[in-house]
Image: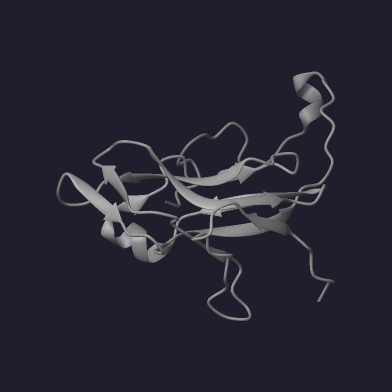
Amino acid sequence: MDEAVEVKVARVHADAQLPTRGSAQAAGWDLYALEDTVVKYRTATLVRTGLHVAIPIGYEGQVRARSSLGKKGLIPPHGIGTIDADYRGELFVMMTWIGEGNSYTITKGERIAQLLITPIPQSVFREVKIEQLGETGRGEGGFGSTGRF
């Protein structure tokens, strides 16, 4: 296993909880709600964590849903959120409610999302003619073209 990646984290509120892992092999670190927050039906709501982080250069922080909340109907409306290495503001988790009823109340201290630290390779885009992209078996098949959903 590679050496651990150090992510600096600062609490900017006395009630903020540091990220924790559910097990030694868990991919994500649980993030906690700083305060009670009402998430209305089909409305994007920012949930405070009270944390600021410094993601190392060459990495990103991916904020992902917790499966237990998704099962209830509380999900991030954008799928996966990205924390860039140069962002130093407070860490928020965007959530929306699609479950039964008009709203869901997140309680202070509730685990609301997972944070994964992921390497990002340096990339360069080089414009070429379409013929230079090469052929694949899939070709131009778009959404659902592989027959796997």
Residue 97: give x, y in percent of width and height. 28, 46
Between 84 and 122, the one lying in front of the other is: 84
23 vs 48: above or below: below
User: Who's the residue at 26% across and 46% down the image?
Assistant: 98
In the image, residue 59 above or below residue 114: above
Against 110, residue 53 (above or below) is above
Horizontal relation, residue 71 to residue 109: left or right: left
Q: Is residue 11 left or right of residue 130?
A: left
- From the viewer's perspective, is 14 left or right of 117? left
Residue 80 in sight in this render: no
- The residue drawn where x is 59% and y is 74% is 26
Number of dots carrying numbers: 0
List x then y, in percent, for residue 93. Answer: 48, 47
Specify whether residue 138 is in view.
yes
Specify how the rendered protein is coloured. one colour
| Residue ID at (28%, 47%) | 38
Q: Is residue 105 left or right of residue 24?
A: left
Residue 10, given in percent of the width and then of the height, sits at 66, 55
